[in-house]
Amino acid sequence: MRRYLMPAFLILFLISNMCAQSLVDVKRYEATIRLNIDSRLLVAEAGLELTNISGAALDTIPLHLRDLTVSSVLVNGNAAAWRHTGDQLLIVPSTPLEYNSGATVHVVYSGDPTHEPGSSFGGFFWGDPTYTIGVSFRTPYVSMTRHWLPSNDIPSDKATFDLKFIVPAGIVVAGTGKLKSVNALGKDSLVYRWVENHPTATYLVTLAAGSYARIRDTWNNLPLEYYVPRKDSLKGLSYFSTIPSMLECFEHYFGPYAFDKVGYCITPIGAMEHQTMISFPANLFAFQPKASTTAAHELAHQWWGDWVTPEDFREAWLSEGFATFGEALYAGWLKGRAAYLQQHHQNISDYVFGIAQREGIFPLYDFPRTPPSSNYPVTIYKKGAVVLGMLRHIVGDTAFFRGLKEYGKRHAYGNATTHDFRRSMEDAWGQDLGWFFDEWVYKAGFPFYVVERRINTSQEDAPEVLRIHQTQDTTVSPLFLMPADILIIKTNGDTLRYVINIRPEAVQDFTFPDVKQKHVASIIFDPLGIILKRVRYRTLEAEEPESAPPNVVLGALYPNPVSTTHEGRSPLVTIPFEIDRPARIQIDLFDSLGRRVRRLIDSRYSSGSFSVSTDVSNVGAGTYYILLSSPNSRQVRRMIVTGR
């Protein structure tokens, strides 16, 4: 076999970009790290067991280490030269490392570790506690473990870890994996040994050393550990008492928990899903009575992000979108489907009316990272969760959760891509989903629908005709292929449900031959509010110019959601509307099945701005619809009513 030697300049190119190609595969890290907290000095030595997977002999072994000073390097017990520039630690063994050959690298280093420049999030932080956060929002390399440990610091190289931390007596160290031992070192120091034998991405390894109380609990024989400030030790168990219900929920939907413990440690900033030891923000611990949405989000990451890790950071929606979707699942687990849908609707509203305008419109995969975006734009959280909710609705619960669990099993303790997830879902559903992932993951934006009833005044028994327009800017977003539910409410109160398949066309007509338009009171497009979209309704006579503007605008309801549990006052919802010329206005309240609950107004109004309020104290929790009807348009707003 011909021997090929990979030159150093090519090594630098391959390891210095977002989708870095790994030239080595690190199997195991061992390190002893002394934290001199008062003097802000880290003194450490690390050992790495690795294999050359580059396809050629390596005369340079590439690792990452930033802002720390290397004093010696050994490769297989022999002294080796090194070059350390920026975050690139290039180790030169005495003889090239052959392809598929293994090596043990030993690095002695020290210094004052740093964190993300201009930010207080990712990296290493001194204080009480002294702690690490595994990712950054702005640095081009994202993973921050290189700020305190020499490593192949990319998400696709998962390894096991055996880390010893030497700290002053009285300091408690929280870490990744199992706490194997705590031993005295002289009179003034302790050595904590944390071992994680499950493959772990470097950005998911952490330490937190401070004045902690270690609170221990179990759930189904699974250790639960909470590291809280010593002064708040009595609060710890009560605050985290919600974690078992989160585990029940996620094991039901995702499959069995994959690690040896669940851990949370209180840190000044967070939250961050470090494997088995979640860094949890101190302000939430201080001001919330119980761990809730944020804790659930980070716990969901133990499946999606930790157990199955994105191949690279271009795929970060596979972590953040999935964990945000987990928030909605947990809301539904606690309070029922209405709560799940409420969270889904909130994610849609947050994205369409806020995030997309602040961050811009871009795909979930390989998104831009320069401002106003970042390494973790809110888009991949909120839109990512909504995309999963839409996929669930399209394929159905049985196929969706079967596919999700299969995706986990196929890539357990490893890495995955969007294509891998798509393939698992297609196998579970039995149909192609390329169209769905193409438009919702790999392309940007969302549809703007105009839902238009076409009234044929010349034919008394004319069938109902619905015209769907897509009006989004097609230089930014595609025309979308999308199934959509239609709810037709008849004048006699009956409701009919249909599914229409909207093609990627600017205009498409749908005829309902078994429904006479004279018997239709109203139509609700996507009645459950599943689709990420903006939508406007209008009614036109067939010969009426399509450019005729609506003469009525139904405003946003407030408050929405509305709670029926307010004490001392009736829960009122205000419905604002504007009209540009005198017209007769009807406003009705419908439930999610299309049944009219009550008529709120039926009066003639002059032009201007108006509002009507309705008391919802005697309606149950759930999703409702406000339907405003005028002579030439019907408009719908969704209303969420919550209970206890």
Image: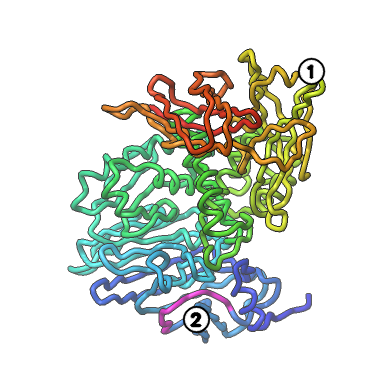
Residue found at x 42% / y 65%: 122
Residue 304 coordinates in the image, percent (x, y): 53, 48
Three-letter amino acid code at disc 2? Gly
Residue 129 placement: quadrant: bottom left
Three-letter amino acid code at disc 1? Glu
Residue 644 appears anywhere in the view: no
Question: Which mark identifies residue 460?
Answer: 1
Residue 252 appears anywhere in the view: yes
Residue found at x 37% / y 68%: 124
In which quadrant of the rendered image does the N terminus lie? bottom right
Residue contact between numbered discs 2 and 1, judged by CB atoms under 8 Å: no
User: Main SS type for the magenta part?
Assistant: strand
Measured Cα–Cα span from mark 2 to mark 1: 78 Å
Question: Which mark identifies residue 86?
Answer: 2
**Considering the numbered disc 2 on the image, is that residue within a helix, a strand or a loop?**
loop
23 or 327, which is in the foreground? 327
Q: Which label sits in the foreground, 2 or 1?
A: 1
Residue 526 coordinates in the image, percent (x, y): 63, 33
Question: Which mark identifies residue 634?
Answer: none
On screen, residue 500 versus residue 286, left or right, reads right
Residue 445 versus residue 30 in the image, above or below:
above
Q: Which residues are magenta?
A: 61-71
Residue 444 versus residue 142 in the image, above or below:
above
Q: Total of numbered circles in the picture?
A: 2
